[in-house]
Image: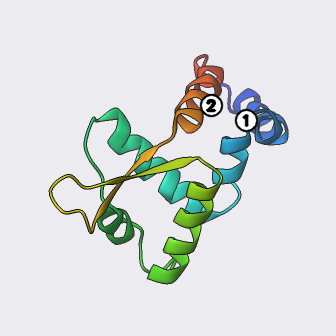
Amino acid sequence: MDYLKFTKFLKNDFETSNNKFKSIGFYRSDLILIFIWFFVLEKHYSKSSYSLEELINDIPKKFASRPTIFKFIDKAFKKRYLDKIKNPRDKRKFNLKPSKITIDEFEKWAKGFSGF
């Protein structure tokens, strides 16, 4: 692998993708949002349901408190980058999934990495 080329590619990606793909820029703006983004997308592509509680438990406690995680989830929900779906078995609980915008932008953005 050409590490210099890859480093330049990543640098350019950070400079351009955050403006080109608004959801990518949003999720990459904070470490907690990156965790949320990766965990939710991973569950989406593995076709698994993912509850709010599971997400909170998956994010390492050393990075964020429960209220902080809720704050970031709420921000993503308000921007329409995350969807909350009532759990069919327990109406008090919610499952999370990436919104169509998040999925579409992620898939377009990820195509840029196909040469690596």
Marks 2 and 1, Cα distance to the nearest angstrom?
A: 6 Å
Q: Position of residue 82 (x, y in %)?
A: 51, 49
Residue 97: image location, x then y, percent: 41, 46
> Residue 13 lies in what quarter of the image?
top right
Mark 2 touches mark 1? (CB < 8 Å): yes
> Residue at horizontal 62%, vertical 31%?
105
Left or right: 16, with 40 as reference point: right
Quadrant into which the N terminus falls: top right
Q: Residue at x 25, y 55 (%)?
A: 87
Q: Seen in the image, is 25 located left or right of residue 100? A: right
Q: Which residue is mark 1?
A: 21
Q: Amino acid at mark 2?
A: Glu
Q: Determine which quarter of the picture holds residue 106.
A: top right
**Which type of secondary structure does the marked residue at label 1 adopt?**
loop
Q: Residue 29 appears at what percent x and percent y?
A: 71, 58
Q: Residue at x 58, y 47 (%)?
A: 81
Name the secondary structure under disc 2. Answer: helix
Residue 32 seen by the camera: no
Question: Is residue 36 visible to the viewer in this orientation of the structure?
Answer: yes
**Amino acid tagged 1:** Phe
Q: Residue at x 68, y 32 (%)?
A: 3
In the drawing, does residue 22 fall left or right of residue 102? right
To which residue does mark 2 refer?
105
